[in-house]
Image (tube, coloured by chain):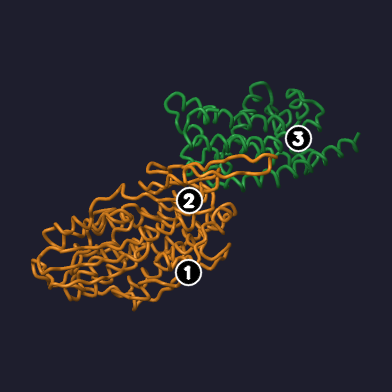
Chain colours: A green, B orange
Amino acid sequence: MAGWASNNKWSLFGAMRSAAQIISYEIPVALCLLAAVMVTGTFDMQQINQMQEGGIFHWLVFQKFPFLFLAMIMYFIGSLAEVNRTPFDIPEAESELVAGYHTEYGGMRFALLFLSEYANMFVVAAIASTLFLGGWTSPFGDFLSGPWWGVFWFLSKGMLIVFVQMWLRWTLPRLRVDQLMEVGWKVLIPFSFVVVLGVGFWVMAVR
Amino acid sequence: MEERMTSERTVAGFGRSLKTEEMVLSMGPQHPSTHGVLRLELVVDGEIVVDVIPHLGYLHRCFEKHCEHMTSYQQVIPYADRMDYVAAMSNEFGYVVAMEKLLKIKVPERVEYIRVIMAEFSRIVSHLIAVGTYGMDIGAVTPFLFCMRDRERVLDIFEQTCGARLLYNYMWIGGLSHDVQPNFAEKVRSFCTYFRPKLKELNDLLSYNKIFIDRTANVGVLPADVALNYAVSGPTLRGSGVRWDVRKNDPYSIYPTLDFEIPVGTGAMGTVGDCWDRYMVRVKEMEQSVNILEQAIEKLPPGDVQAALPKRIRPDAGDLYVRTETPKGELGYYLVSDGTASPFRVKVKSPCFVNLSALPAMARGSMIADVVAILGSIDIVLGEVDR
């Protein structure tokens, strides 16, 4: 919206790419989250988190191996695209679109747009750590757990994922817009369906 | 122009036909990846580029006209530095080779060796910038920082030799401004041993990266015959598989006595003449430059660094054209002397200008992101395009 409103052709491109990207990556991300929800049987994040208490092997990443592990990886890739990080940062692709949708923004308005980008990065990281990495629970069972340690574990898990996001951002080149769509539709979506089906049958069989 | 901007096409497929219009996108002169102040007028149909029209002249500073108003031939050299400012030594080299041919003098052998060493260093510096910024055009930042770190080593050697890091005014007509420092040979050798593993590191990080190959292979293909018709030169031509290098095909200085190879594009990742080939030719050329450095530093003879010259240089009336191989391609100087102490005419055939002319042929029909990749793979320096 911000890109469309600023009446700049580069911003327009950024906004169009952003819309296309979010539509195509929302699906695998949602499907991966659904896999976690199917295992826990609840949409309540607190309950999902409580079910993962008791050490690193109770975390959802290591449940129903390898389906939820795959789901975690795919959620991470999809979330990179959702928050416009390299290699999926084509909406703002600095060397192509100057700055994408926030080309025409400066000062506080630019700061707000950019802060929201970084806030988004932590949000997807926090969701990943809640759903797959045990959220506030300690990796060592009862050792080092408690309310304050919970804050510590939650933040450090989130920051670890943010760190990996930044690590990739400085290392990898950027995909082209059609290649990005290919990855989204031809790789991530089929695999996320496989994961959902696999987890579904597993849950059914165990019951 | 007007005609193209208003051209309309109809798209079928929605039961009724839709009228679409092409958009004119002005890329530059202030754009992060036009490598200077180049303006590209892109006619785009969505993300597809229908046409590219480069607009030049933002950095024109009348180099050739200035040369005619110099009071001596020597004064041209600092201006020649400022053409291809990332490989200034190579520009000086071409000019002094041309001047010495015009004056029919021979320079001491030590001078020739030091000049070749400097020219190959500047080739490494220029290719490091080309490769590093190319990585950044594609979106990878770390290779750029790696390249800048290695480039710093060479600049330190330059600084120690002549006091400047970018624009040297080091090669003078008939010799050099200073002799090299006593520890020069040792520094060159240590650079060679330092640099080879770094090239491998660069290959691991960028050249064989899956995403990088996806972005560059089969993109911006320039077939050999088209390349020859556009008269492109340097890595842009060799990327298309044409084995042409002035150092081998029309040798000057001491290049015939040195053993090195001319890498050409092979289409290892896609088609011959794509962006990846042009990129890889540069990486391989850096390897060859290190070979040349090692040989030249072994053979470096002792002696004087200035030939005996009259205080005022007055070549006989006449003209000549001399070409040399700079990192960007074939740099030609056409000098006309009327027998006075200042040049009558200095015409420069700049490789970047010629290579840039092939951009529309390569970029038509590709995507916007590809235009950036193709432009980066040509490796232009606007200081030389506009002069």
Badge 2, how many Cα within 10 Å: few under 14, some, many 20+? many
Q: Amino acid at mark 2?
A: Asp
Q: Which disc number belongs to residue A60?
A: 3
Location of residue B381 (image quadrant): bottom left
Q: Secondary structure at mark 2?
A: strand
Expressed as whole percent of the image width and height from the top left, the position of residue A46 reads: 73, 23
Q: Numbered disc 2: what chain?
A: B
In this view, the residue in front, B347 or B8, is B8
- Seen from the viewer's position, the closer of residues A99 and B385 is B385
Task: Find out whether the residues at labels 3 and 2 contact each other: C-beta distance under 8 Å.
Answer: no
Residue drawn at x 17%, y 69% is B306
| Residue situated furthest bottom in the rendering | B257
- Tell me the amino acid under the disc marked 1: Asp
Seen in the picture, residue A183 relative to A108 is either above or below; the reply is: below
Q: The C terminus of chain B is located in which quarter? A: bottom left
Q: In the drawing, does residue B317 fall left or right of residue B187?
A: left
Identify the residue at the far top of this view: A147
> Can you tell which of label 1 and label 2 is closer to the viewer?
2
Question: Looking at the image, is B342 positioned above or below residue A120?
Answer: below
| SS class, disc 1 | helix
Instruction: Tell me residue B99's x, y (percent).
Output: 20, 69
Same chain for labels 3 and 2? Say yes or no: no
Question: Could you tell me if residue A22 is visible in this image?
Answer: yes
Callout 1 crowding tier (Cα within 10 Å): few <14, some 14–19, many ≥20: few
Asked if the residue at tag 3 contacts the one at tag 1, i.e. Cβ–Cβ closer than 8 Å, the answer is no
Q: Which residue is mark 1?
A: B225
The residue tagged 2 is B51
